[in-house]
């Protein structure tokens, strides 16, 4: 039986671009494994250790940085976040795509270290559209929306780091496009 090697897929995009919905669709595909990042930030209600994140103490995280256990790591909002090399190696060896959803600093590190993969940037059709989407989410207050739009503007300037820029005009088309560029379009055979 032919066995194909899996690929690393790096997925990023500004908050409000529709990443969560794309991720949800990809999670249903058996050819894809999602990274469980490690972090030092506190566990939120409902989050499960080993499912949403590996919640680590700072000393533990720093010891793992020194042992080169992360393919990339970043400090975001004062806390460490990183992708574990061991999980990626296992997923790729099993022939599945290993998808990591990270912010732009992490992508820069991966590019600088020459890590091969499909780098996908999901963007809104415009900043006005992004603002409207954030306003439609009950979760974000006006200051938070303004901050996220400002961050999005800076992030959009980093589109050159990615191989594929997918514009989310309609969710179904965006999901199909992401699947096509990472090579899992067509019917999944579990
Ligand atoms: P949150 O605390 O809201 O779960 O995540 C904060 C930010 O950290 C999000 O932008 C998320 O994409 C990013 N993030 C989560 N895991 C990782 C990781 O392993 N590496 C990097 N570089 N960013 C991550």
Image (spheres, rainbow, N blue to C red):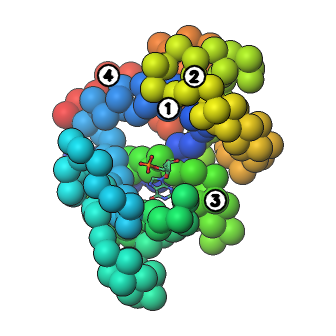
Earlier along the polypeptide chain: callout 1 or callout 4?
1
Front position among marks 2 and 3: 2
Q: Secondary structure at mark 1?
A: helix
Up-down: is 49 above or below 73? above
Decide if ligand 1 comes within 8 Å of the CB at mark 3: yes
Q: In the rendered picture of this protein, how many numbered marks are placed on residues?
A: 4
Label 4: which residue? Answer: 187
The answer to which of 8 and 67 lies nearer the viewer is: 67
Number of residues whose C-alpha sits closer than 10 Å to that of mark 1, classed few (under 14), some (14–19) or many (20 or more): many
Front position among marks 1 and 2: 2
Label 1: which residue? Answer: 19
| Residue at horizontal 33 percent and vertical 41 percent from the top | 32
Decide if ligand 1 comes within 8 Å of the CB at mark 4: no
Q: Position of residue 180 (x, y in %)?
A: 51, 28
Residue 163 as seen in the image, left or right of residue 189: right
Q: CA distance from mark 1 to mark 3?
A: 17 Å
Label 2: which residue? Answer: 134
């Amino acid at each position: 039986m032919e066995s194909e090697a899996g690929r690393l897929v790096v997925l990023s995009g500004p908050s409000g671009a529709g990443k969560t919905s794309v991720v949800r669709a990809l999670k249903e595909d058996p050819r894809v494994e999602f990274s469980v990042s490690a972090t030092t930030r506190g566990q939120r209600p409902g989050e499960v250790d080993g499912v949403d994140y590996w919640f680590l103490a700072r000393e533990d995280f720093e010891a793992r940085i020194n042992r080169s256990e992360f393919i990339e790591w970043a400090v975001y909002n004062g806390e460490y976040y990183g992708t574990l090399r061991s999980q990626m190696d296992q997923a790729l060896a099993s022939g599945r795509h290993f998808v990591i959803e990270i912010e732009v600093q992490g992508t820069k590190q991966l590019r600088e270290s020459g890590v091969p993969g499909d780098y996908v940037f999901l963007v809104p059709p415009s900043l006005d559209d992004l603002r409207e989407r954030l306003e439609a989410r009950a979760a974000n207050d006006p200051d938070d929306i303004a901050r996220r739009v400002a961050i999005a503007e800076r992030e959009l300037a980093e589109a050159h780091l990615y191989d594929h820029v997918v514009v989310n005009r309609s969710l179904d088309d965006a999901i199909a496009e992401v699947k096509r560029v990472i090579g899992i379009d067509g019917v999944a055979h579990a």
